[in-house]
Image (tube, rainbow, N blue to C red):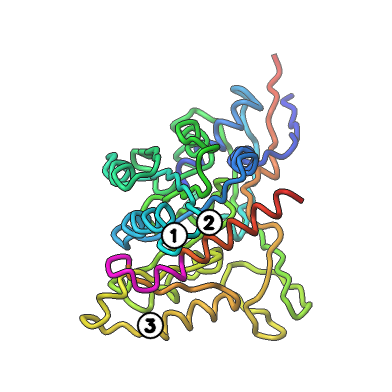
Amino acid sequence: MAKRIELEKIVIGKSDKIALRNRAAIDAAGVLALNLIGSPGCGKTTLLEQTIARLHHPADGRRRLSVGVIEGDVQTTIDRDRIRKAGAPAAQIETEGACRLDAAMVEEALAEIPLDAIDVLVIENVGNLICPTGPKLGEHLKVAVISTAEGDEKPAKYPSVIVKADAVVVTKLDLLPHLDYDLDRAVGDCRKLKNDIKVFPLSAKTGDGMDAWTDYLRAARKANAAAARR
Amino acid sequence: MHELSIAESICRSVTERVGAARIDDMVVEVGALSGVNRESLEFCLGEAARISGVRLDRFSVELVSAQAKCECGNSYEADDLIQPCPKCGGFSRSYTGGEDVVVSKLIMVEEDG
């Protein structure tokens, strides 16, 4: 006679445990970590280049904040090279087909980032507005990036990324004269999905709106460091 | 799109647990906020089991709600991230649970001899 044996349950995705480990390493270095999520071509890397320029060389005499970046792409090291050229340490994850980063990939890449030498770590996820919203990587904040060129209905059509995000950056504001983009609708839809969400419309190209964004990062880093000390 | 790799990792975990034994029944619970599509995982599980040689007689994939707590004080079950609070209609809420993928039931068959 065959015997039926009921076994204990199994939680799949040790990813969360690794995410906690990543977070511990990031916190130990007093670093603020962001998970940047947006479609391919929405301007994540350009936003980063300009963010690095402003945090590394603040115009108003404020303290320099050093940025480190983990780049996630399906293929190539193009983005890592762009970030290094912008003056920040960067590691590249090539997922070879996977549609999003997970905590184990980030843990491996963290070994290449000098955490003690940076203040802000940005993990640029694979270009995709859906899949990356799931796994925790060890970040403090999730930031959704949507560009005006994608259309103003994107927050309504991709609600899960907005709901999970702490902040939304609307990029390519300089294209507004060429588009039928209703910024109020996009921002309104974000707020409808999450009443207290921060929204930063900006143009990394012209610099319009960049100060509000970098001020937010400075404030978040400060708050995070204060919380870590408690 | 990521469901196949999750299905593969379920098969790996099951093999670690039962070796080559036959599985009589398995239930996988998918949290509503896990970002995993139930139907897609169900399809991928069948394929992943076949490819990895896991002997799966029966299995099912079930959706598990998350608990949402609204700023107004109301608690409700949420099957996705876009449901407003049914009481006040607001969108200021926090969630607990519903983020995991769990093999909640696993029955193996121990053959004689």
Question: Which numbered dot is residue B35?
Answer: 2
Rendered location of residue A131, percent (x, y): 45, 54
Residue A226 versus residue A17: which sits nearer the camera? A226
Query: Disc 3 to disc 2, how far (Cα)?
Result: 28 Å
Question: Which numbered dot is residue A183?
Answer: 3
Relative to A166, is A208 above or below? below
Q: Which residue is mark 1?
A: A130
Relative to B40, is B84 above or below? below
Chain where mark 2 sits: B
Element carrying mark 1? loop
1 and 2 marks in contact (CB < 8 Å):
yes
Answer few, some or many: residues within 10 Å of disc 3's Cα (few below 14, many 20 plus, some between 14 and 19).
some
- Is residue A211 highlighted in magenta? yes
Tell me the quadrant of the picture where the N terminus of chain A can be found: top right
- Does any portion of residue A116 appear in the rendered image? yes
Chain where mark 3 sits: A
Chain where mark 1 sits: A
Residue appearing at x 74%, y 34% in the figure: A7
Tell me which segment is drawn in magenta: A204-213
Quick check: A162 left or right of A209?
Answer: right
3 and 2 marks in contact (CB < 8 Å):
no
**Kind of residue at disc 1:** Ile
Rendered location of residue B78, percent (x, y): 65, 69
- Label 3 vs label 2, nearer the camera: 3
